[in-house]
Image (cartoon, helix red, strand yellow):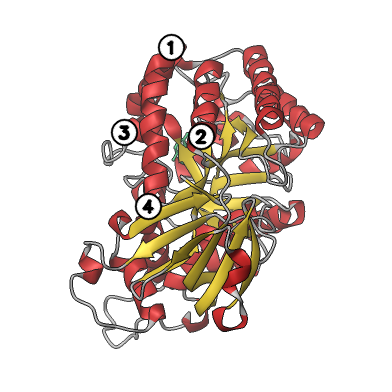
Amino acid sequence: MTIQKCVFYGTIIDTPDPLTLRVRKHHVCVVNKGRIEIIEPSASRNLDEHQDYVFIKLSESQFICPGFVDLHCHAPQYRQVGSATEVSLLEWLTKFTFPNEARCSDPSYAQDLYTKLVSRLLRNGTTTAQYFATIHLEATKILAEICQEKGQRAYIGKVCADQNSPDFYIETTDEGVRNTEEFINYVHHMQKGRDIAGTNALIHPVITPRFIPTCSINMLSQLGQLAKKYDVHIQSHIAETADQVAFVHYLYPSIGDGRDVAIFRETGLLTNKAVFAHGVYLADNEVDEMVASGSGVASCPIANFLFSKGITAIEHLRRRGLNVGLGTDIGGAYSSSMLPVVRAAVFANRTMDFVSFDRSNATLPFFPEHKDAVVDFKFAFYLATLGGARALNIDSQIGSFEVGKQFDALLIDCNKESQAFDYWNEDEMDIIFEKWVNAGDDRNITGVWVQGVKV
Ligand code: GUN
Ligand code: FE
């Protein structure tokens, strides 16, 4: 893969904030060494200046938009996608997920599975993914190498679990901490070895305690110390289901108030580089504490519908100042593509209006109070791109199209087969974009670039 110098000419669409769909028609976007050098109306640009660049002229049916940031997915669970959707979280973990993840003790199995996964996610337009791997160091390194080789921007964690796990899928505290440190050093070495002048490293290590029930306080505290020593990202699950919250309180009643946020705080894991999945059952004082720490939430609405019996109150959290993005939560949820997640985030927001719906009062209007708090398609697309980047603290690098940012982009073509475009004659690009987000699919994605490289 060589770093291309490209000039895109046509329609450029992104969401610089949750309420704004920015449609820049007849624009040029000049990309050099992975970065956006120029975005401006094509009329003001003399293209002769860029004769040594690859020139990509978009047709009337095409636009470019930012690549997706999948803020939370489990690489080994790709095998499970679409199955085991009718059990509770804790049963799902013990019956299906732990035995499945344990297979990654075999590096050749992990190599095969992760190769298919990363290819699929890129095909789906996921240019950045934050992955949980498994407890196995070797397989986690394999995932990092595959992402590097295929050119996906990836935040990757070796999962840590030293308790409440089956004998065939558990590690000692010492192994978990030692292998996490080795993985951090491994990735930092990869970054040095492959750094391309002027561009950012693609692969990043993430400290990854699975969730509080599977981690001793000793393990969590040692991981907190590693986070401080290396200043790296952190990920875990937080306040996902009522029985998980109760289990945590049963295990650690006297650490803070015995809830997830306090325990992460007390063990040094509540930092501005931490992203926690779900956050369905967060009290407002906990949200405020997360805001003060600078940490973020990966809302995974499909998984929440299946497991949480509740939803992440995205707009409420954002109003309090929390950074929120979206995750597929492969394979606790059934989609490896972010498009269904974007749609589920819209649905989840709508259900907020129904929870107190009075069935006996048929005159009650739908959406009574929340007119200004609606997560619509553009808001959800923002969460799946710039919102996710912000939660990872990399919004100065990716998530929207600005001069100086990395070019992580999708080329969408409405002339490819999908239900959205069997019949259309709209010439309004914002409508075309909405149709793709709501009813299009990966067949409309005809090009994917990460850091200016076509992958
Ligand atoms: N909590 C602990 N592990 C998991 C997991 O793999 N998926 C989900 N959704 N929640 C978890
Ligand atoms: Fe998860």
Count residues near mark 1 (Cα–Cα under 10 Å), then give few for <14, some for 14-19, many for 20+.
few
In x, y percent, where is residue 212? 59, 32
Please identify the residue farthest to the bottom as the structure is shown: 363
Give the Cα separation between the discs numbered 4 and 2. Answer: 25 Å
Which residue type carries mark 2?
A: Cys
Mark 2 sits on what residue?
147
Q: Position of residue 344 (x, y in %)?
A: 37, 60
Instruction: From the image, tell me which residue sits under label 1.
Output: 168
Under circle 3, the secondary element is: helix
Sequence-wise, which precedes: disc 1 or disc 3? Answer: 3
Alpha carbon distance from label 3 to label 4: 15 Å
Q: Is residue 264 above or below residue 368?
A: above
The verdict on label 4 being within 8 Å of ligand 1 is: no
What residue type is disc 4 on?
A: Ile
Q: Earlier in the sequence, mark 1 or mark 2?
A: 2
How far is mark 1 from mark 3, CA to CA? 19 Å
In x, y percent, where is residue 379? 50, 70
* Residue count near mark 4 (Cα–Cα under 10 Å), binned few <14, some 14–19, many ≥20: many
Lower sequence index among marks 4 and 2: 2
